[in-house]
Image (cartoon, rainbow, N blue to C red):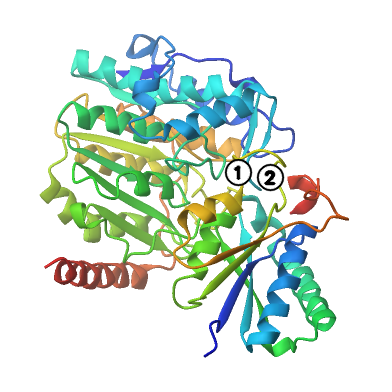
Amino acid sequence: MLIINGSTDDRGHEDPGHPERPERLAAALAGIEDLHLGDDLLAVAPYRASRAELVRVHESTYLDELGAFCYEGGGDLDADTYATYDSWSLAQYAAGAGLAVVKEMRIRNDGIGFVAVRPPGHHALRDRAMGFCLLNNIAITAAELTSLGERVLIIDWDVHHGNGTQAIFWEDPNVLYVSTHQWPLFPGSGASFEVGGLNALGTTVNLPLPPGATGDVLRQALEETAAPTIDEFKPTWVLVSAGFDAHRADPMADLALSSGDFAQMASLAASYAPGPGRLALFLEGGYDLAALQASVRATFGTLLGSDVATETPTSGGPGADFVKGNGDTREVALRLAHDASQ
Amino acid sequence: MNPFHTIAVGFDGSQDSKIAVRWALTLARHHDAQVVAAHAVGLLGRFDEQTVGAQLEESLFALCDETGVAHSRARLEVANGDACSVMLRMAEPPVSADLLVVGTRGQGAHPGLLLGSTSLELAEHSPIPLVIVPSAPSTGQASATSRHESM
């Protein structure tokens, strides 16, 4: 069963001409409709995240300022990020969507979650909007889960490094953050020597990859560099920052994945979940509408065992040397950090 | 002893950032320092990164001429990230600046609002001395160019 958040009208968060636009969410949902899930699709009621749930991740002053900024009409928060009058309310619903989906999954102890929301979240910092993101949706849900004693693996396959999520959990040993992303690219963080703070050494795993990297390289990076850390961490939940802008058709970056690659990455992510009802995917980027729809269809079709056609997974691109280098750099960084902490 | 070897200054082409660059170049001339003009490339910046970079470099060298600083003492550093993160990175190797300089407001931020202010963010987080150069009285507040005009 696919458990998805009930939709809210997100058209109030729009800046004409901006690539982070309402049509993105419509394309993602069209990918789900393509699967004709019938009774295997459950939509949970929209829910606005409470102040107490938000302050686990964000500073109170930032929340106050963001709310006031929106109620005054909004505008540009930085060169990339906008907010409108409706954005504050919609961002709270986007944050609450993850909480509602995971709550339903916990009750049922079953299902696969899809948090289909905008604005996206993984660039949002504790005290700052950034990279189209206002509130860090996946971090808010992960923080809720850790407050319940869970150990959360976050896999972030958006083409951009999730700097906000990394920073929020930098010192949290109960969250393992694993990111594949293009390098160099915005936001400029996500080097393989970034391995976590002194209280959580090793719980950040960065797998930067060069432009043109194909799906086989991403899977290799996950299986060779991240998998041993994941096995050792023993997650009780798996959340995915599922951006689909690593698709070869996406205008925002230069990785070369197909929709079939996302399906394979999703299967890999599912293999790390300890049982049913412990895997939820959060929509992040993805700006080519056709590629977004096809990738969502392939991802969830594969996870749910539907007979769905996907593009052929890609292979042969550059980056195998990056994978080796990432692993070596990570080992050195961990050793140096351990020595420094003695 | 020379207190400054490398001065990093935020540069996005706005009037306020030009004032900051001019100030940094003048200081560099007095202290025989290098100036790194840092330009942050955001998510949307990738679409015209090369064009904007060339324009900013031309503008930087014009400001060098204006302040009497040799071109060899200044360079443009184009880096991925938001303005605050990029400036904080200038304090780390390989640039290792010993002073950060920014204007009061760059492009894309709202005058009068705390939110989105690079200078205030830097004031909170910078590990090295920071100078915030105020707008010239004649120019008033920051330019009102929109994101689409500025990128």
Q: Secondary structure at mark 2?
A: loop
Which of the pair A29/A20 is nearer the observer? A20
Left or right? Give the position of A61 relative to A110: right
Tag 1 residue:
B116
Q: Secondary structure at mark 1?
A: loop
Q: Is residue A38 above or below residue B99?
A: above
At label 1, the amino acid type is Gly
Crowd class of label 1 (few under 14; some 14 to 19; many from 20; radius 10 Å): many
Q: Is residue A40 above or below residue A73?
A: above
Which of the pair A164/A226 is nearer the observer? A164
Which of the pair A6/A60 is nearer the observer? A60
Are circles 2 and 1 on residues that touch, CB within 8 Å? Answer: yes
On the image, which quarter does residue B21 sit in?
A: bottom right
Badge 2 or badge 1: first in the primary sequence: 2
Q: Residue at x 47, y 47 (%)?
A: A258
On the image, which quarter does residue A40 sit in?
A: top left
Expressed as whole percent of the image width and height from the top left, the position of residue B54 reads 76, 72
Expressed as whole percent of the image width and height from the top left, the position of residue A150 reads 17, 32
Expressed as whole percent of the image width and height from the top left, the position of residue A109 reads 18, 18
Expressed as whole percent of the image width and height from the top left, the position of residue A87 reads 59, 25
Tag 2 residue:
B109
Which of the pair A170/A290 is nearer the observer? A170
At label 2, the amino acid type is Ala
Q: Is residue A289 above or below residue B137?
A: above
Disc assigned to residue A50: none
